[in-house]
Image (cartoon, rainbow, N blue to C red):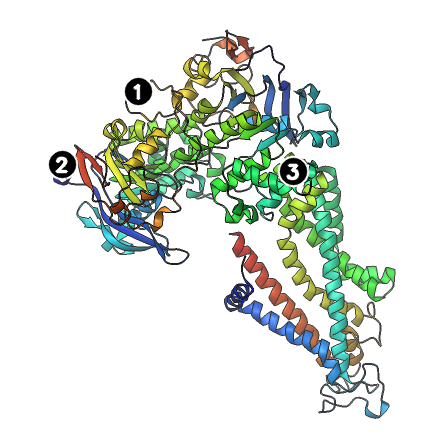
Amino acid sequence: MTTKTQEPLLSVDGLVKVFRDGAFTLRAVNGISFDVYPGETMGLVGESGCGKTTAARSILRLTEPTSGHVYFVGTDLTQLSSREMRAQRRDLQMVFQDPDTTLNPRFTVRRTLSEPLQLHKLAHNGSLEERLLQTMSRVNLGPESLGRYPHQLSEGQKQRVGLARAIITEPKFVALDEPTSSLDMSIRIHMIALLQRLQEELGMTYVFISHDLSSVRALCNRVMVMYLGTIVESGPTKEIFDHPLHHYTRALLSAIPIPDPQVRRQRILLEGEPPSLFDVPKGCAFHERCPDAQPDCREVRPISRDVGDGHLVACDRF
Amino acid sequence: MASAAQRLRGFLRLLREHRTLAAGLLILTVVILAATVGPAFVPHGPLKVDPEIKLQPPSLAHPMGTDNFGRDILVRVLYGIRLDLRIAFMVAFTALIVGTLVGTFSGYRGGIIDDVVMRFTDVLQAFPSFVLAMAITAMLGNTIPNVVIAIAISYVPFFIRLTRGEVLSARELGYAEAARCVGNPEWRIMYLHLLPNCLTPALVQATLCLGWAILDASGLAFLGLGVRPPTPEGGVLVGEGALFIISGQWWTSVFPGAVIVLMAFGFNLIGDSLRDITAQEER
Amino acid sequence: MILVEKDALLRIEGLYVSFPGADARVTILDNVSFEVFGKEIVGLVGESGSGKTMTSLTIMGFLPASGRIEGGEIWFGHDQLLDYTEEEMSRVRGRKIAMIFQSTRSALNPLMRVGDQVARVYRIQRGLGAGQAKAEAVKALSRMGIPDAERRAKAYPHQLSRGMCQRVLIAMMVACEPDLLIADEPTTGLDVTIQAQIFELIKDLQQATKASILLITHDLGVVAETCERVVVMYAGQVMEMATVESLFAKPLHPYTQRLLSSVLRVDRTIEMPAVDAGLSEDVAYSVAGCRFAPRCPRVLPRCWEEHPPREQAGPDHWVTCHNYK
């Protein structure tokens, strides 16, 4: 278990990402801050368009953040030159969402997996092959797949090649973007188990981005809930899932169907749909759909506060 | 991996399904074969002058007749095909290389660089490509390399636009992002990851350009702005022969003209069917 | 309660469908039998490749050209749908059986206002006049929980969110007043809060219209919360069929047991299994008998050769297994 006395591996401070296109301004990430400690798995949950993927891409500088800082083992990633950043990428990896497009269609699996090793000069003559085979077996793929092209692989195999590419340099930090969402239910649990095993073997730290809350519950020890570019609630997984405080978290959790007809819950149905990121409402981003919105919520953006045990909630009414 | 026999079978099936492709390939095989081995069977040189037999109609000794210097037209046509094909391939190759490299860069970088490149292609495309090529040869002087450069410049905008469009959609895909994430420098992302995946439309376009380039090169030569006489080249031959059409010696320009048309037709058939085939595969 | 005594709304019996494979034709649906009765919501669950979508396409007469029906019967009331001509089928579709597809936006005409698309259904299926149809369409859209329906009716599909488009589509299907509504993964790609809204809507509609719904899904949570009965499919075979309570309380087929034990839950932390590849179906199709045999922990020699019969194991609980006891 992680304790707060440790130094965080990754520390995000006031991260903002704004996309501008002509007259339009899209505030995808609207000032988020959090710490991730070595060896833990931080969940980042929210619905499509809440900015969770953009947040991860900004942290890894796959897109340049508009403002804010990202400290990785003390280094501010946002201040690095592109050459210095490239050198850091050995330790900062990401697994991408769509298995169909994540692999270069003209590269064999061997070439896809060798590339990171060659770029970071980690493979010396004989050791390359050994490293490839070791990584393939780590993600439960047979060596025969090395010579294949992506179109010759199944969906699940492509997913695992994408995972292999991310872990082959044995990074310290991996952002996992919806790695279970395209999988069938019975396979999800195996993906989670695989991720857990890899984490133990390689001592990696994860940020797990997903809208699939049951996978989040199974894998993460802490969770952040994102809504329209801001983090509305965060804390230890069990605490968030069993005692959600923010009205959005409550509605989100109650919307997930439970595979047990004996369990009957009161479902909180939200009115309407999330507003567009082009037009984030003033005050609390959630007030238009909140069942308990007060006049104040329309005006003042609530500040995140600690309600004990590292459980933070950005809401003045609960 | 497919064996050679399997590949051959696949290729034959492709030809059966796409008759136009088969027809185009057949035409060009015949033309290229004639141009490579043909001259060996004709006992005349392309520049051999013989005033005794000038302006002879087609006969067994001279199947396409002779011109006003008594040169054998068949052998001049065969040599002309060689030169036209050489020009066409150099044009298409140059335009393909320059166009895809610039197009990939422009599409990947976006922003001001992309704007500048696009406006530049707009300017080039504002001229009819043949007029542009005329202007460039007139400026550079009409040698064969200059003809190639002139025609290639007029085709480059097509390749830039095609490749740029492909790169614009491909750079949003996961593999481009993943390539950056594992630590690829920008040039590797552009030219090792994106370009090979965005090349198909440009390759099809290059095939079509082969046909156009033959027409343009001949056209320039006909107007006296391209390859100069007495070098045997399609347009030169038609130009020389055109003087004698009124006096009834039709063979002097009809045979060279027909061969130019045939080559251009062959390349267009191939290019069109390749476009259909690749469009089907995309779906 | 015994099945055969009730008159089924939809009865599928011994349905076989094959598709061309690499070498020979592959039997994609292998002896599929189940019933849907009046006024109920039945879940058809299985993982991708289990044949659940192919089953619904066969019912609708939308089988792709390369597919071939090798045998079986599909009874809708007293009509055998497999004997129908294309023209007769087109009269059944919409009026008696309607279907909501997975991909939402592409099912709507992008060049037509959504209100007009719903109104057209009223004109064609119910013979209403243009003005009346339009008014009905707006009413239908607002019944689907679309706020400001009057204004939204004038929108084009690309101006609406995917959740809204799915509501429009449901409005069109309900306008047909079908006896049976087939919903094939109707919330794929929608957010969970929107998914919850759509399923509440579907349940309310079922109460109001008394239509039966065949809900195709891979999500056991949705089944548990929405359906009354379940049909479980694996690799083109029906493994188990029961009421939701009975299936979740006492799954009998080894496949169902495995499926239920491997589902992640949001309300509690479950035990992690050892890492393996999951229940991939790639080897299953070559088995002559029960297709779960290659992965079954309780496999008997005859499972490989003989397809097990459908046995009644309890009130309204049927299982297709040689060794379930």
Q: Amino acid at mark 3?
A: Pro
Residue A210 drawn at (x, y percent): 49, 27
Quadrant of residue B79 in the image?
bottom right
Nearest to the observer: residue C219 or residue C170? C219
Is label 3 in contact with label 1 (beta carbons under 8 Å)? no
Nearest to the observer: residue A134 or residue B101? A134
**Marks 2 and 1, how far apart in space?**
28 Å
The residue to which callout 1 is attached is A264
Q: Secondary structure at mark 2?
A: loop
For residue A116, which numbered disc appears in the image? Answer: 3
| Label 3 chain ID | A
Label 1 crowd bin: few (<14), some (14–19), many (20+), radius 10 Å: few
Q: Secondary structure at mark 3?
A: helix
Along the polypeptide, which appears first: circle 3 or circle 1?
3
The residue to which callout 2 is attached is C2
For the question of whether residue B170 can be seen, the reply is no
Q: Secondary structure at mark 1?
A: loop
Q: Amino acid at mark 1?
A: Arg
Q: Amino acid at mark 2?
A: Ile
Name the front one of labels 2 and 3: 3
- As drawn, A157 above or below A18: below
Residue drawn at point x = 64 percent, y = 73 percent: B29
Quadrant of residue C267 in the image?
top left
For the question of whether residue A3 can be seen, the reply is yes
Nearest to the observer: residue C50 or residue C56? C50
| Label 2 chain ID | C
Question: Is there one chain holding both mark 2 and mark 1?
Answer: no
Name the front one of labels 3 and 1: 3
Residue A204 drawn at (x, y percent): 57, 26
Residue A259 drawn at (x, y percent): 33, 27
